[in-house]
Amino acid sequence: MPERKFRVWRGDDNGGDYESYDVEVEQGMVVLDAVHLIQSRQANDLAVRWNCKAGKCGSCSVEINGKPKLACMTRLNDYAPDETISVQPLKAFPVIKDLVCDVSWNYEQNKRIPPLKPKPRDKDGQFRMMQRDVDRVQEFRKCIECFLCQDVCHVVRDHDAKDKFVGPRFMVRLASLEMHPLDEEDRIPKIKEEFGSGMCNITRCCTEVCPEHINITDNGIIPLKERVVDRYYDPIARLLRKIRG
Amino acid sequence: MGTNIANSQLRVLGATERIDRWWLGPMLVLLGLSGFSVYATWAAFQGEHYFHESYLSPFYSPLLYIDTAAAGSAPIEHAWIGAWPEWWPSFLPNSPAFLILMFPGAFRFTCYYYRKAYYRAFVASPPACAVGGIRQGKYRGETFLLLFQNLHRYALYFALGFVVILYYDAFASFFRDGQFGVGVGSIVLLINATLLAGYTTGCHSFRHLIGGGLDCFSCNTVCDVRHKGWSLASILNRKHMLFAWLSLFWVGFSDVYVRLVSMGIITDYNTW
Ligand code: SF4
Ligand code: SF4
Ligand code: FES
Ligand code: FES
């Protein structure tokens, strides 16, 4: 069986570095398989978070050769046979140990979002919505909360603006609520002021890394920015609102 | 809280663990946009050879004023207002392009796609995904100096007018002295208007205004029609980057074509 060279970041919140491992790989393996082989044969104390091995739980997010990816969905044959594969934890969040980091900041953001506030029911006691009204929102519901988009977003990653921007994953959640046909809550002021829609400069890295291929920027963030424009920046829209009362 | 590796692996410009050619995309954008800007500026400064028979270069349309003394200029009846004005500063060439180029310029400058492209390629914010950007001290995104980007829809309103004008020019280019004919130039101009229409109606602001801003698409007939508009705009929106580049290239090419024909350097094949 062919051998491949791996570098895996080992360390904790006091710092760390890459360690090299040679692994006998088989056809069809993914990066998570290789990490498991290293863990079982060479480094029993290697910490890695995973769960489904099917790209659906969002646990195994790491950075592979510098790109945020799901370890369980990244095949070894995506890389040239002689290329060393480097695996490191997400950069934007504090490391706990090795490949595992503390993503709890994300859950804190989620709690800040006002939940769905449904309209009154129809006379017969039912809620009704048409398929085409929810098609848009269904795209956003594919999110597996892997936080790869949060990790790659330069606002969160490079500018330490975690207090000013909730990040792309939560812009997606906000979009799914704001566009919901049954929802009555108005989140636009918060989207502008507290959740920081203006901090995103639509450079699309979130969309590039999303394993669920959610069109985060074009279908989520930009439409929200446009709704913020309607409310705050478009003088004609403001005037029309005044006239209509 | 613990260390975050981004801090330990210095966040300097270009810092990354990526080993692929991440710099290629931004470099091509840098070359493409710079090349176009240099050519467009040069072409605008010429003030001549923008017209030939029924062809009008899109860089010069609409013609508000015309200096008929310039070589390769349009006859005075093509002017929307009239002859070249006295008040025009003498240090600038009498070029009709100066009066109108800011509209398409503002439209492209504030376009959501081009913003991505030049934030990455020109200001490295960030240069590519998971690559260290320029340390901007205090990054403020589009909340401070870039607040004007929020007025993109106003540039769109003008751009929609330009689509109509350029289609008019394209159709007019099929007629010389009232006689219908087809020339390579008229096809070039028709393609130009069509690519520009595809770019403009795939605009994110257009998509929002035509229907994207609604929460309920099926609530009444108006919403229903707007949903159809939104669906069509969404199809083009998915190809917005492609249309952005094709229309940019083609508008430049159209000017080159009309210019070379007007200068007599190339012959326009046609049926007249
Ligand atoms: S498009 Fe916006 S949210 Fe997405 S990565 Fe870029 S700055 Fe962050
Ligand atoms: S939007 Fe995509 S990248 Fe972001 S958390 Fe959800 S699935 Fe992951
Ligand atoms: S292990 Fe569940 S997504 Fe990778
Ligand atoms: S978003 Fe590109 S033209 Fe409006």
Image (tube, rainbow, N blue to C red):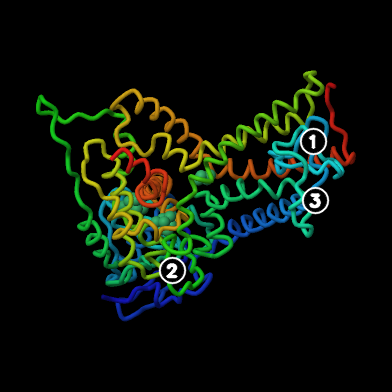
In the image, what residue type sits under mark 2? Tyr
**Helix, strand or loop at mark 1:** helix
Q: Nearer the viewer, mark 2 or mark 3?
A: 3
Chain letter of the residue beneath label 1 in the structure image: B
Q: Is mark 2 in CB contact (under 8 Å) with mark 1?
A: no
Sequence-wise first label, 2 or 3: 3
* Residue receiving disc 2: B139
Residue A127: x %, y % from top left: 16, 31
Chain letter of the residue beneath label 2 in the structure image: B
The residue carrying pointer 3 sits among few (fewer than 14), some (14 to 19) or many (20 or more) residues within 10 Å by Cα, namely some
Q: Residue furthest top?
A: B179
Tell me the quadrant of the picture where the C terminus of chain A can be found.
Answer: top left
Residue B46 badge: 3
Give the Cα distance between marks 2 and 1.
Answer: 51 Å
Please state which of residues A57 and A74 is positioned toward the viewer in this rendering: A57
Residue B28: x %, y % from top left: 64, 56
Q: Residue furthest right?
A: B264
Label 1 lies in ligand 4 vicinity (Cβ under 8 Å): no
Residue B76 badge: 1
Name the residue at 55% across, 65% down.
B123
The residue carrying pointer 2 sits among few (fewer than 14), some (14 to 19) or many (20 or more) residues within 10 Å by Cα, namely some
Name the residue at 44% across, 38% down.
B207
**Helix, strand or loop at mark 2:** loop
The residue carrying pointer 1 sits among few (fewer than 14), some (14 to 19) or many (20 or more) residues within 10 Å by Cα, namely some
Q: Residue A12: which quarter of the image? A: bottom left
**Helix, strand or loop at mark 3:** helix
